[in-house]
Amino acid sequence: MAEGPPDRNKSKKLSEAKRQNTNALIASNLRGYYESIVEEGTPSHLLDLLERLHVAEEEAKSRKP
């Protein structure tokens, strides 16, 4: 037995295609956003902070008996 009238099956296929197109659009937008963030790089003040943290950790390790 068929899964309903042919129009309903066509509607399901269109709905699935629309969902896939929407998902593809979302994925494309997220990819573009991610790439723009990566291209910006890490701000210098954050790199400085990470370097100071690294130095502080190394000093703490060297003080331990």
Image (spheres, helix red, strand yellow):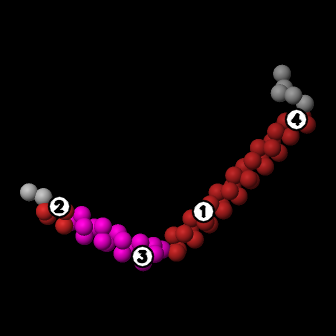
**Of discs 2 and 1, which sits in the foreground?**
2
Identify which amino acid the numbered label 4 is placed on. Answer: Arg
Disc 2 to disc 3, how far (Cα)? 24 Å
**Of discs 4 and 2, which sits in the foreground?**
2
Which element carries disc 3, helix, strand or loop?
Answer: helix
Question: Left or right: 11 with respect to 36?
Answer: right
Identify the mark nearer the N-term, 2 or 1.
Answer: 1
Q: Position of residue 52 (x, y in %)?
A: 30, 71
Task: Give the class, few, some or many, for how many residues have Cα within 10 Å of label 1's Cα (few <14, many ≥20).
Answer: few
**Of discs 3 and 4, which sits in the foreground?**
3
Using the image, tell me which numbered label, if any, was put on residue 31.
1
Q: Which residue is mark 3?
A: 45
Residue drawn 91% across the image and 37% down it: 7
Identify the mark nearer the N-term, 3 or 1.
Answer: 1
Q: Which residue is mark 2?
A: 61
Identify which amino acid the numbered label 2 is placed on. Answer: Lys
